Amino acid sequence: MSKKMHYIGLMSGTSADGIDLALVEFDGQQPQRAHGANLLASYYQAYDDDTQQKIMTLYNASANEIDRAGSLNIELAQQFSQAIIKFLQQEKLSATDITAIGCHGQTIRHRPVKNPQITTPFTLQIGCLQTLALLTDIRVVGDFRTKDIALGGQGAPLVPAFHQAIFGSTEKDVFVVNIGGIANITFLPKNAPHKTTGFDTGPGNALMDYWFEQHQSGRYDAKGQWANSGQVCHKLLQAMLNDPYFSQAAPKSTGREYFNAQWLAKFTNQSTLKPADIQATLTALTAETIAQEISQLSAKSDVYLCGGGIENNYLISLLNQKLNNHLIVNTQTKNINSDSLEAMAFAWLALAFDQNIFGNIPAVTGASRPAVLGVSVKP
């Protein structure tokens, strides 16, 4: 790569609220710092209620799910393409200005570990790459997680390699915490890139959003105001923390197919608590599971936050209380839009595919070896 090239990263996360796009410029003369990754522009397109409901329904087994998944696979690709075309128009660019799209797709099932019900681990993202390439007239790189699963890994998280290039420090321990539907952390020990690790800590916004929608109007608890009006029930919190996922050693990953309405019902069906108290407790659960993992890995660090959860003031206040020896800041302090970081990572993974750069870190995912991830689809 001898010149500056432009990639679009596309992310639709476990919150299933919409499409995040990032236009990223990479410099072939600068292999350090993720080839000089420079965010030029970002774009967000929200899903309508119908699309979000279709995605949410597919997180768990239900009637006629193959037909519904097949149809939504195409529908999402159409919506992805509409967002990209609008984005290009906004930036006064054409398809020929873009080297490739790095498309994560929409996870509808993530089962990386064998159990009595799942004899063969798998992960499934939808949003048809062929359709997306045809409708945008841009080459698409996607299906990033499957090879890591085939190599015995969790298929997640895949962003730590990008975090390492952007945030790694020789002077201090660094964490990057993404609070989406599921929360995940990347740990970057100072001056020790070979010891980078990362994993899902558990629920991020998923349970809070679900509970809010059941008892209030809207999709989420704006700024955590409703949770802040309640009281944390420490008995309920401890019961939730006893779930074996939280004590499981890394590598580990999870999703809405585990932390969902059915999981929550085990704790709330017989509860006499006020709904606001349960919301406060769910917010404390997210904060506690993040803080617990950070504290076990480092006594003092810089913690960079990204994802939708950073808008929850109550959640951030709990994190500050629990991590008072750590400096907690928004990734914006590194001139990186916190809403765009994951989309940037998938733009970089598309570049990594093109340049034969390993996209996974076996110490993070548990894969048997590092690998170039993804497949490429021409229009």
Image (cartoon, grey):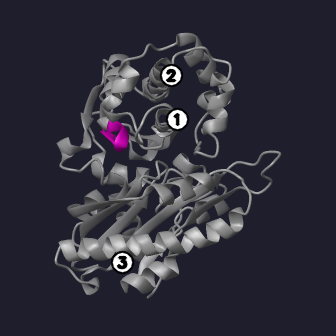
Horizontal relation, residue 16 to residue 313: left or right: right
Mark 2 or mark 3, which is nearer to you?
A: 2
Q: Image height check: is 270 above or below 219?
A: above
Separation (CA) of disc 3 from disc 1: 40 Å
Q: Residue at x 25, y 61 (%)?
A: 42
* Other-residue count near label 2 (Cα within 10 Å), few / some / many at <14 / 14–19 / ≥20: many
Secondary element at tag 2? helix
From the viewer's side, name the closer residue of 178 and 74.
74
Q: Residue at x 45, y 22 (%)?
A: 284
* Other-residue count near label 1 (Cα within 10 Å), few / some / many at <14 / 14–19 / ≥20: few
Marks 2 & 3, CB-CB < 8 Å contact: no
Residue for badge 1: 214
Residue for badge 2: 275
Q: Image height check: is 6 above or below 183?
A: below
Q: Residue pushed farthest right?
A: 116
* Other-residue count near label 3 (Cα within 10 Å), few / some / many at <14 / 14–19 / ≥20: many
Looking at the picture, which amino acid does disc 2 mark? Pro
Q: Is residue 356 something one can see in this rendering? A: no
Residue 322 point in image, percent of width and height: 38, 18
Residue 352 point in image, percent of width and height: 40, 69
Horizontal relation, residue 274 to residue 220: left or right: right
Marks 1 & 2, CB-CB < 8 Å contact: yes
Residue span colored magenta: 305-310
Q: Which mark is residue 100?
A: 3
Looking at the picture, which amino acid does disc 3 mark? Ala
Q: Earlier in the sequence, mark 1 or mark 2?
A: 1
Separation (CA) of disc 2 from disc 3: 46 Å
Q: Residue at x 18, y 41 (%)?
A: 333
Q: Which mark is residue 338?
A: none
Looking at the picture, which amino acid does disc 1 mark? Gln
Residue 116 point in image, percent of width and height: 83, 45
